[in-house]
Image: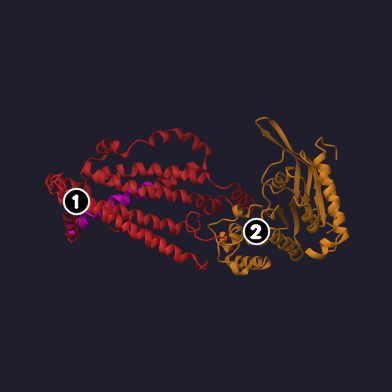
Chain colours: A red, B orange
Amino acid sequence: MTAVPAAATAGTAVPAPGRPAGRPPRTRSRRRRKALLGFLGVLGFGATWELFARSGVVKQEYLPTFTTTVGRLVTELGTTKLWSVVGDTVLTWAIGLALSVSAALVLGTVIGLVPFLRRATHTTVEFLRPIPSVAIIPLAVLLAGLSREAALIVVVYAPFWQVLIQVMYGIADVDTVAQDTARSFGLGRWHRLRHLVLPTALPYVITGFRLAASIALVLTITAELVIGNPGIGLQINLYRSAPDAPGLYALVLVTGLLGLLVNLGTRAIERRVLHWHPSVRREGPQ
Amino acid sequence: MAERSVLLSVQDLKKTYVSATGPVEAIGSITFDVRPGELVCIVGPSGCGKTTLLKCLSGLLAPTAGSVTLDGAPVTEPPRTMAVVFQEYGRSLYPWLTVRDNVALPLRARGVPRAERTTAVERALEEVGLSQVLHKYPWQLSGGMQQRVAIARAVAYQPEILVMDEPFAAVDAQTRADLEDLVRRVWQDLGVTVLFVTHDIDESVYLGERVLVLSSSPTFVQEDLAIDLPAQRDQLSTRALPRFTELRTHVYEQIQRAKRAETAPTP
């Protein structure tokens, strides 16, 4: 639905000051084409769904039509119940992501800066990282009961490793010439960390953050489904047992839209924070 | 001058790297002095350890033996009165900082108050002819301009000695000529001592008041040559002087001899 303006809105975050006039129009037309294609894609998806649901292969009480679902979604958007459910999910997601990212940032920086710690933690990190968050749900429930806290343990786990690894690699990636420059100009520990090491790690951190934000959302909804703390996941479960298929599918669409928003948001942040990075910047001498 | 006849003193400097195949002697034994206010060029065949020498001089690398003394004090870490301009300007300037912030960073780290910092940065950028790009990022500039920014950063640091490691190796010929003249001007304007490392024979003769010719590895100073060209130099007339040709031919022969003499003679 709103997949369309993704590239367009995010792209305008960084205006390229005073560069050749030939470039922007070309990018703009390309962007418009991309937007059109995205729109056609959504339309195609909706049409296929509609035809499939009407074909009778699956009973409509299990798979309502696309139009029914979208209609239900519009109705739901007008209710406070939907917004409070979305609010619950977003709150759990935000707290989990914040805890996860800040812990990973601090620990990753410390471990990354101290070669001894890096070597000492390597095996443990590689062991703990691949454990799926879902696998620790029983442990979380045991620790915190069927509560938002238990959900948070699950939400924090996987993104934490994602960001931690990125930060550790980023911290270790400081260019040798840049490092020599800092040393020869007498930059102390703090200034080197603030003006050289952290900016070097930033692209890695942002990549980690983008992945973490998506993973955290998936885990938030998973936790609500399994643990039953309030949020979209719990509501989906309630609609399933009602049974209320259009409501269920409308909520699935809501989760999709949330994911899209998260992605848009993190991309916008990326473009803003990394405006100087070769992957984002638009101009240069050549 | 009388009380400080030597600013930088390098005594019997030796550097041996440990590699998988055994020790590699990069620098055999280098000895030379630089007087305050001199402009000395160091030239040598490729692979003779120029960069290693420079890293030892600037306190970035510990020599295996021998000593480096700056202003009477042994150099064990990067000295406050020395500024270095690296060859790889693209990596030496920080892409996340604007031109102004790049130049100001060493002053900030040293705790220079903001107002003073601003003046120093603006003056340094003016000195290298770049006052109009204060708020641009280094990667928005051409290679030559980026190296000017790096020179401005070194100038703003107000060093007694400016050490340059093949700074113009990566820029085109015309830009290079402009930058050479810039180095001469900065040297004359500021009265700073300059140690300029290069592999380019013409450049060393054109720029230097004195040229140190290094041998092949394991390196020693093969010749210490005074350049008796007029103080006011320009790309056309200086390079056309018969004396310039003589000097460059002489240095060229020395380098050729250095390359041939793979079995190291004693200095």
Give me the chain letter of mark 2. B
Residue A83: in magenta span: yes
Mark 2, Cα crowd under 10 Å, few <14 / some 14-19 / many 20+, is many
Residue A63: in sight, yes or no? yes
Q: CA distance from mark 2 to mark 1?
A: 64 Å
Residue A140's image quarter? top left
Task: In the displayed orientation, state which residue is furthest to the top.
Answer: B21
Which residue is found at the position 82% from the left and 38% from the top? B261
Residues in magenta? A79-100
x, y percent for residue B188:
77, 64
- Tell which tag, 2 or 1, sits nearer the viewer: 1
**Which part of the image, by quadrant, shows the C terminus of chain A?**
bottom right
Give me the chain letter of mark 1. A
In the rendered structure, the answer to whether residue A35 lies left or right of residue B243 reads left
Which residue is found at the position 67% from the left and 57% from the top? B171
Task: Quickly name the residue at label 1.
Answer: A51
Q: Is residue A251 above or below residue B182?
A: above
Q: Is residue B136 above or below residue A206?
A: below
Task: Quickly name the residue at label 2.
Answer: B147
